[in-house]
Image (cartoon, helix red, strand yellow):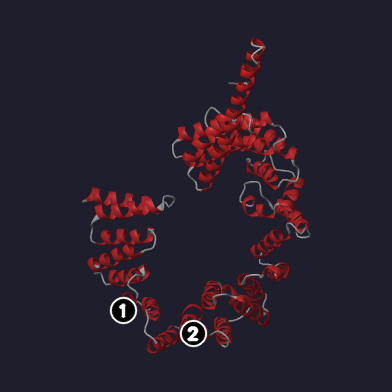
Amino acid sequence: MTASALRSFIRAHPCSSVSTIGLFLIWASVRLFSFTAAGVYDRVGRERLEAKQYESAESYFAKSVRLAESNLDYRLDLGDCLYAMAGQAKEYKTVLSDLLQARQQYLKATALNPREGNGWLGLAQTCWWLSRFSGHKKELENVEYYFQHALSTDPNNGQFLYGIVGFYLAQPPGERTGLPADIEHLAAVYPQAYNDLKKLPNWTGERQSDFLKGLKIAASNQLTCDSALSTLAGIAVETKQWGEAASYTERLIRLREDSNPSCSAYFDLGYYRLMSGRADEAKKAFLHGLQISDNRLEALDNLLSRLSGSVHQITTVSLSAKGVCDLYLDLAKETGAFDPEVFSSRQMIRGKAYLYIAADLDAAAKCFHRAIQGRDSAAPHRYLADIASRRKDWDEMEMESHRATLLAPSDSELYCLLATALQNQQRYIAALQAIDEAIKHSPQPNAGYYNSKGWLYWAFNDYPDAIKAWEAAGRIDPKAGWPQSQIAKAYEMLKKK
């Protein structure tokens, strides 16, 4: 019974006080149950939404809205869920339907409370997306108004500022170019926005200068200084201003002193110092990072990857490749002095340094052979197989990778190495068996393994099976274009047979 129905009954039966009280209690109980149930449905819906179970979440949000139509939060949750569903839908009609329903919920939310900015934000984003659909291009006319309305409810809200600035910068050049004040204001409250904004069509050097002004304001604000300094360091790296990058990183480390900064921050500082030609200071930063690391072997591997990946850059501004290798080995030696695990792994550490930094294959091979003499394991054989591959010694590569698979039979990468060695010997059947083992032992589906399988079938003109392998790769990595390209080539070959 609704409130209006209850009032009509009381007016029609003025003497039925007992019945009236009873009906009122029943009505109150029903309303209380409805509100309670609506809250439960909404909470379950949010849990499902966080788990990306969108259809289930939408059904719960819809129930909460039906039970409490005037509740603003429930409408916003339903709108957000429908918008997310549109992002996952693959069919044109489904996307359009979800967006239209989301717009309806946001419109009702803004009608319930025009001062709720999230409703206007949802409405702006939804209409912006809708404007890309045929027959709905006029929706674009209202988008700016909706973004501005959201911003008027909270001028310092980073999400609202990001929405309107992103909208301006995403328009075709010459139309809306964004206001410098908005960009500076956005940087001051939401420094992380930089990485997305710089990809937009109207982003220019002038816009970046405006954003930098806001970042420097954010760097002096206790609430935003951490993300501002990180962004400033990243921009300095982009422009190869290594001294500035190091300075911002040092400030960031000091800021995080109370929260125990990770070794990666010191590795960043060391790398920037190295790129500035200050090798001694770089070494101090790297060593400090290793001292505070929870897993120094893993940290040394991460540092090795960074140094080896940038060795060509470093040699143009700082040390030679041999100098970089010596620096790394000095760090490992000093770390081994206080870490027994690093000390016991010194031959493997030296071998990887010679292999990946100095590219000295002979010196690396000697270290890995010494490591085998100390304790035979899969790792040194895996690296010896890598050395054989670089020398194009396929027999040696086969022997070492096969030995590695015997010592670590669940490591899929080792089977892939073995398959490569066999493929280069044109032993395609054996290579297929090896790549099947790689697929079998892979902790998660690997498109690269299926690509290798496809080329192995191609090698002996088995195009139907090659197509099946590349189709499997495409299912694993649906965004990749190469499986479809290779499938098309395989079909062309079939036509010629």
* Residue toward you, 189 or 15: 15
The kind of secondary structure element at disc 1 is helix
Per the rendering, the mark at residue 403 is: 1
Residue 129 in view, yes or no: no
- Outermost residue on the top side: it is 12
Q: Quick check: 125 above or below 196?
A: above
Q: Quick check: 74 above or below 364?
A: above
Near mark 1 (Cα within 10 A), the count class, few <14, some 14-19 or many ≥20, is some
Q: Is residue 302 left or right of residue 317?
A: left
State which quadrant residue 433 falls in: bottom left
| Labels in figure, total | 2
* Residue toward you, 107 or 285: 107
* Residue toward you, 188 or 201: 188
Q: Quadrant of the N terminus?
A: top right
User: Tag 2 or tag 1, which sits nearer the N-term?
Assistant: 2
| 1 vs 2, front mark | 1
Residue 171 in view, yes or no: yes
Q: Position of residue 473 (x, y in %)?
A: 36, 54
Q: Quick check: 13 above or below 45?
A: above
* Residue toward you, 36 or 80: 36
Q: Is residue 144 left or right of residue 428?
A: right
Q: Position of residue 32 (x, y in %)?
A: 60, 32
Q: Is residue 395 left or right of residue 4?
A: left
Q: Amino acid at mark 2?
A: Arg
| Mark 1 and mark 2: Cα distance apart in space | 21 Å
- Outermost residue on the left side: it is 497
Q: Position of residue 361 (x, y in %)?
A: 43, 83
Q: Quick check: 185 above or below 28?
A: below
Q: Position of residue 190 (x, y in %)?
A: 70, 52
Residue indicated by mark 2: 350
The kind of secondary structure element at disc 2 is helix
Q: Residue at x 61, y 18 (%)?
A: 19
